[in-house]
Image (tube, rainbow, N blue to C red):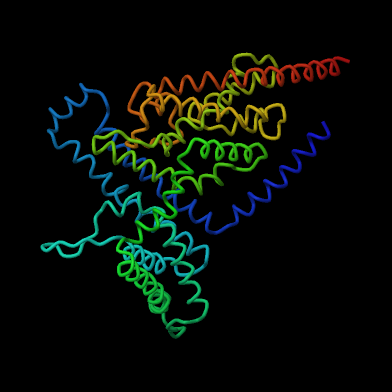
Amino acid sequence: MNTDNKFFNKLYEVLGGLSEKLSENIYIQAIKDGMLAYMPFTFIASIFLIIAFLPIEPYQNFMISVFGESFVPNLCLVNDASLGIGGVLVLLTISRNLAEKMEINALQVQITALIGYMLLVPFGADEAAGNFIAVAFLGAQSIFLSILVSIVACNVYRFIDRKGLKIKMPASVPPAVSAPFESIIPSLITITLFWVIRLAIDNFNGTSALEIFNSILGAPLQAAGGSLIGIILVKMFSQLLWFFGIHGDSITNAVMTPIFQVLQMDNQAASLAGTAPANIICQSFWDSFASIGIIGSIIAICLIARSRRYKEMKKIAMVPYIFNVGEPTLFGIPLMMNVIYFIPFILANVVSILIAYFATAVGFMPVCTGLAQVPWTTPLLISGYLSTGSIMGSVTQLICLVAVVLIWLPFVKIADKQICEEETVEETAVQK
């Protein structure tokens, strides 16, 4: 037992140190906060898309009879105006968050980053309309470019600003007036840098910065994050952090959410175009299938627990978990730092991922359509149906749920037996 304690203590030290460094990294923080600000609009757009594409034929016929053939395109307008410019939204949120953490003029940096981003997005040409930018280039496919531009713009702006290369106004001038003037030189140099990059790429490569960046970095990130091994390793790492009381999702989501969002939007584009989505792993898969794990512990407790502690636990933990809120279970059982539960804590989610992945791969369940990105608090079975547009998504979730409960049962039985023995000893001591 002493050896086990030394192992877990050492592992906690390593993971704790790593988590602290990641949590304090301003770039990780800015990406996480920026993506969190972007996420509500994915849910809002999903509401309109769910209404437009609910896969029930009588419903579709009714909506067409009432609102006409245009009801679907009209509902899609919200998606086009939000997720359709997802790259721009991510750029605005991340650049602002990062500028605030760097303590530089957030508003001016935000505008500067936006101009730099637009310089790197491909322009088109039309004899009637002149130069234009295709809206498709402003969507999810440019999220990785948005992150890079935000980081570069903030760092270049900060470097120039710290060097004092700015127009200094008298102290009597109000900040609202002086701040824009002081930003002229840092913004000019930053924008000039992006302009030079744009010209260099146009003249020597013949492609666009967006295409180059997506092929060099975006494609490998999608391949890694969208692979079965990749998502399993990420989920295991997240659960390992949680086991030691570290908020694992806040660490992994900062890195993985942009990748999952790009994969999600690829599926959405395919679904809207009437073709089959290709990415099994995406944001909806992560939210609706990869997170089925810990709920098995509280269901197992409800099924077999005899100890007073666990009987009280199930009264308060089950209802929150209907909405995927697991803190009462994590802290109440407790699961964290509980060696008995280490194996199911780490592996239950992996089993759920494997079941859902292979269910999709063999055609038992459709690939997540990307049309409905439901909040993570959406109850099981409902989220499975909405994410896939099929009742088989709910059936797959139910199979995952049964599997994780079976994994947790023997470990809950061991822990419950120990607690019962402790309670018996305590009762005996009280009687004496």
- The residue lying at 40 percent from left, 69 percent from top is 108
Look at the picture and state if 18 lies above or below 374. below
Number of marks: 0
Residue 304 lies in quadrant: top right
Q: Report the quarter where the C terminus lies.
A: top right
Where is residue 216 shown, x and y percent of the image? 43, 55
Judge from the rendering whether residue 281 lies leftward or rightward of residue 134; answer left or right. Answer: right
The quadrant of the picture occupied by the N terminus is top right
Q: Is residue 383 above or below residue 148?
A: above
Residue 204 spot, x, y in % from top left: 33, 68
**Residue plotted at (40% across, 57% down):** 213
Between 234 and 71, which is closer to the camera in this rendering?
A: 234
Q: Considering only vertical position in the picture, is 243 above or below 205?
A: above
Q: 235 or 219: nearer the eye? A: 219
- Give whichever of 3, 247 is nearer the camera: 3
Instruction: Name the image quarter holding residue 47.
Output: top left
In the displayed image of the protein, which residue is found farthest to the left? 128
Q: Position of residue 171 (x, y in %)?
A: 47, 83
Residue 261 rendering spot, x and y as whole percentages: 40, 44
